[in-house]
Image (cartoon, rainbow, N blue to C red):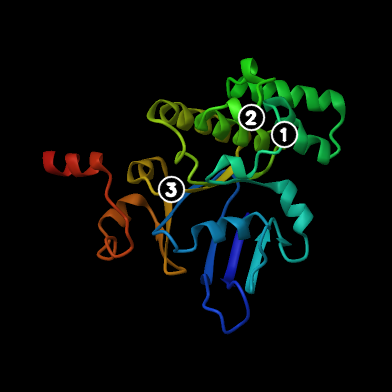
Amino acid sequence: MIRFDRVTYRYGNKETSSILEEVSFSLESGEVTGLLGRNGSGKSTLAMLSGGLLVPSEGRVLLDGLDSAQNPHSLGCLIGLVFQNPDSQIIGSTVEEDIVFGLENLGIDREEMGKRLEMVLQWFELQQLRKQPIHHLSGGQKQKLALASILALRPAYLILDEPTSHLDPWFRREFWPLLNALQKDFQLGMLIITQQPEELLRFHRVLVLHKGKLCFDGTPQILWNHPERNAWGVRVPEEVLVSRKVD
């Protein structure tokens, strides 16, 4: 379980304004939750806190009982974080090199490394691109590679920061069935940050951040009828608006 216990984060000293303020929630293993909010609401900061890249100014982030401030290396093995821009986390010069980079750093033996490499290449249909230089890849292919490199590490939880923002509509249609299949196979806990209202239909639970505070934790259906929804910058998916007109 990932648990935020009254987490406050600020860039600077105590006089600096908080990016997040007393945020509390938990994410169970195998649970898929969406995270919404306007630009600047603190979503990416929350993602980095979840992955142990940042430490709370106040409060605690616990992962399966481990405090992120005291066990940063343990968190790195349990949580996979995929950033909005895949270029920010691709290390290798080719597809294959990027996937094995993390495995080599974890000290995975060669036989197991080879198995994991072949597995994620197949999952993401990257076999033909394994020797391809990174700068020859499209935005969608880079996003696939970033996710493949993380999943090769076998994390227990996956944090995705707007994973479809760099994908064209064709890749986006492919992405969600693949993600659903991987989540079921590995029972990954997932926190998915999104700005796309239609993607809300894929979540049973949604969190909403507004001005650094967690202002909503519930189902999409309750959120769509919430009186503060517009103030939080949450749009109702077109499919829902159409169905309401039909009803």
- The kind of residue on which mark 2 rests is Ile
Count of residue discs:
3
Image vertical order of residue 121 relative to residue 67, above or below:
above
Where is residue 49 drawn, in percent x and y?
62, 60
Name the residue that disc number 2 marks.
134
Marks 2 & 1, CB-CB < 8 Å contact: yes
Name the residue that disc number 3 marks.
194
Where is residue 237 drawn, in percent x and y?
28, 44
81 vs 223, left or right, is right
Q: Residue at x 37, y 52 (%)?
A: 219
How packed mark 2 is, by other alpha carbons closer than 10 Å (few <14, some 14-19, many 20 or more), is many
Work out whether mark 2 precedes mark 1 in sequence or the reverse, and give the earlier one: 1
- The kind of residue on which mark 1 rests is Gly
- The kind of residue on which mark 3 rests is Thr
Which label number is shown at residue 192? none
Work out whether mark 3 precedes mark 2 in sequence or the reverse, and give the earlier one: 2
Hey, which quadrant is residue 228 in on the image? Answer: bottom left
Residue 247 seen: no
The quarter of the image holding the N terminus is bottom right
Image vertical order of residue 167 relative to residue 82, above or below:
above
Closest to the camera, between mark 3 and mark 1, is 1
Q: CA distance from mark 3 to mark 1?
A: 27 Å
Work out whether mark 3 precedes mark 1 in sequence or the reverse, and give the earlier one: 1
Where is residue 235 drawn, in percent x and y?
28, 52
Marks 3 & 2, CB-CB < 8 Å contact: no
How packed mark 1 is, by other alpha carbons closer than 10 Å (few <14, some 14-19, many 20 or more), is some
Q: CA distance from mark 3 to mark 2?
A: 25 Å
Element type at mark 3? loop
Q: Residue at x 75, y 58 (%)?
A: 72
Where is residue 238 drawn, in percent x and y?
24, 41
Which label number is shown at residue 92? 1
